[in-house]
Image (spheres, rainbow, N blue to C red):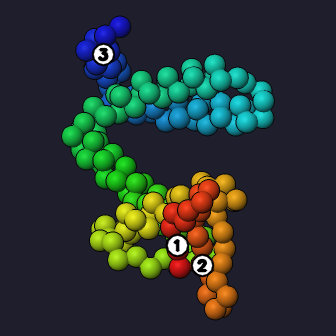
Amino acid sequence: MEYASKGSVFQQALDKWGHDAQMEMSVEECAEWTVAVKHYKRGRVGKEKLAEELADNAIMLEQMKDVVGRELFYAAFNAKLERLAETLREDNMHRKLTQQEKHGLRLIDRSPVDKHGWSKCADGIYKALKDLPAELVEACGDDGTRKVRLTAPGKTIVDWT
């Protein structure tokens, strides 16, 4: 079935049973989804049951977009999505700071920073340290400071203080 005709089916269901009845049905389908997830986690149903209940909810949610208004829905959806992205950025930044502090590492970096206060250079080095094999990361520093040197056979790639 093409999406255009699906939209027509959604509208036909709303026309036939009305907004209130379809809102009640949406609540019922959400409850069935909840039960299916609980049963799945206990090994009582398979992914097929999850797919079935997810499909029921997707159909109802498409109808609910028409009930509340698609423009209003997408404005709220985009705002929530942006808030989630911001939370993930903040969480990632916090994790990086925590890892730095845990290991006593600091980076002297004079690169321009983005709107979140992170320089592209620092971010790249943090990622590089995390992904490099231990034999390429050498801790050094006799003066009481902690330093990290990224090395490759025969040369130093980055000195990180």
Kind of residue at badge 3: Tyr
In which quarter of the view is residue 45 placed? Answer: top right
Tally of numbered tags = 3
Residue to which mark 1 is pinned: 159
Residue 129, position as x, y percentages in the image: 58, 61
Residue to which mark 3 is pinned: 3
Within 10 Å of disc 1 (Cα), the crowding (few <14, some 14-19, many 20+) is some
Kind of residue at badge 2: Lys
Seen at 64% across and 83% down, the residue is: 141
51 or 96: nearer the viewer:
96
SS at mark 1?
strand
SS at mark 2?
strand
Seen at 37% across and 63% down, the residue is: 120
The CA span between labels 1 and 3 is 56 Å
Number of the label disc, if any, that sits on residue 55: none
Q: Of callouts 1 and 3, which one flags the residue occurring earlier in the amino acid sequence?
A: 3
In which quarter of the view is residue 2 placed? Answer: top left
Residue to which mark 2 is pinned: 147
The CA span between labels 2 and 1 is 7 Å
Seen at 65% across and 91% down, the residue is: 144
Kind of residue at badge 1: Asp
33 or 107: nearer the viewer:
107
Residue 153, position as x, y percentages in the image: 62, 56
Task: Tell us which disc is closer to us: 1 or 3.
Answer: 1
